[in-house]
């Protein structure tokens, strides 16, 4: 049940959810003849939508999440026995799709393959299952393994953990494999914005993982332009993703998972 709640409850505090809530309140006031009050709430919803959809706001929110664990050069990554690669990066093949679909976080998979080819570690533990409502028969970990092999990682160097549904389960389910394989302190590969929460969950389980960030979404700009203050659907998604991660961090702390 908590898996469903963890996906549903954040909707009430994410930008798109708040916009809909304010618009609903405006509609209710309008039904009761409170036109001025309705106009206030409708204006607030439109203002929030505009602000959340501007690149300057979206990149500020996401940048605050990414700044603690920036990406580093391959030569700066310490040597380790294992890599733990977290899912949330691809979707399996399903008709009419003919190939594995690489999502925005697919940089994680590429980074893990690069680490292996650079001999920073000799084993990759892939952690990623499907949500209960997923239409896919194949777990995400299996699809990631297919990509890793296409990018030069032999099957013998890949271990699958294919039942986890969230970050905490990634850590819990990977812990036994980490101990079984004698990984010690593994390299942890996930998105830069997701790294703080991921490291905290592994640390809570007694695993001192070494961060290797991928999927860095905010880049340094030489200067701002007027376009950075105009609403953009990609910026709205980034704001939504950033607020989802902030909410996730808070939820995990309340639960005692990090």
Image (tube, grey):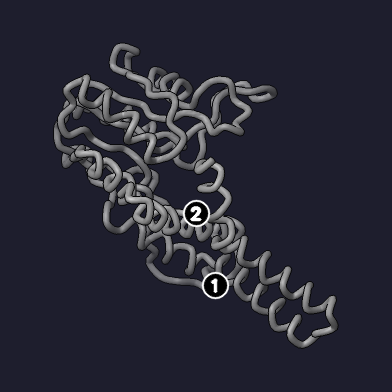
Q: Residues within 10 Å of mark 1 (few under 14, many from 20)?
A: some
| Closest to the observer, 127 or 69 | 127
Q: Position of residue 26 (x, y in %)?
A: 74, 75
Camera-side mark, 2 or 1: 2
Task: Give the residue drawn at x 38%, y 24%.
Answer: 161
- Separation (CA) of disc 2 from disc 1: 19 Å
| Relative to 154, 185 lies left or right | left
Dot 2 or dot 1: first in sequence order is 1
| Closest to the observer, 189 or 56 | 189
Q: Position of residue 126 (x, y in %)?
A: 36, 26
Task: Give the residue drawn at x 57%, y 32%.
Answer: 132
Q: Position of residue 232 (x, y in %)?
A: 60, 62
In the rendered image, the residue lying farthest to the top is: 156
| Residue 33: quadrant of the picture | bottom right
Above/below status of 120 relative to 213? above
**What secondary structure is found at the residue carrying circle 2?**
helix
Q: Are marks 2 and 1 in contact (CB under 8 Å)?
A: no
Identify residue for label 1.
229
| Residue 219: quadrant of the picture | bottom left
Task: Give the residue drawn at x 49%, y 42%.
Answer: 104
Task: Give the residue drawn at x 42%, y 58%.
Answer: 246
Identify residue for label 2.
241
Q: Position of residue 250 (x, y in %)?
A: 39, 58
Quadrant where the N terminus sits is top right
């Amino acid at each position: 049940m908590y898996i469903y709640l963890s996906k549903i409850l954040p909707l009430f505090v994410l930008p798109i959810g708040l916009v809909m809530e304010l618009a609903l309140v405006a509609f209710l006031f309008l039904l009761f003849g409170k036109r001025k009050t309705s106009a206030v709430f409708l204006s607030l919803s439109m203002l929030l939508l505009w602000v959340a959809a501007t690149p300057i706001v979206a990149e500020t929110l996401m940048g605050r999440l990414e700044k603690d664990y920036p990406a580093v050069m391959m030569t700066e990554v310490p040597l380790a026995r294992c890599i733990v690669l977290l899912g949330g990066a691809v979707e399996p093949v399903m008709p009419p799709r003919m190939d594995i679909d690489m999502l925005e976080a697919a940089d994680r998979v590429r980074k893990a393959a690069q680490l292996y080819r650079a001999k920073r570690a000799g084993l990759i533990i892939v952690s990623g299952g499907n949500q209960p409502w997923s239409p896919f028969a194949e777990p995400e970990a299996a699809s990631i393994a297919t990509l890793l092999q296409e990018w030069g990682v032999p099957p013998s160097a890949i271990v699958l953990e294919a039942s986890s549904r969230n970050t905490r389960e990634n850590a819990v389910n990977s812990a036994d494999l980490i101990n079984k394989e004698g990984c010690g302190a593994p390299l942890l590969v996930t998105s830069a914005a997701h790294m703080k929460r991921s490291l905290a969950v592994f640390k809570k389980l007694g695993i001192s993982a070494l961060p290797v960030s991928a999927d860095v979404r905010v880049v340094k700009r030489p200067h701002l332009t007027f376009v950075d203050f105009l609403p953009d659907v990609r910026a709205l998604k980034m704001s939504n993703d950033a607020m989802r991660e902030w909410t996730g961090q808070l939820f995990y702390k309340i639960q005692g998972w990090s």
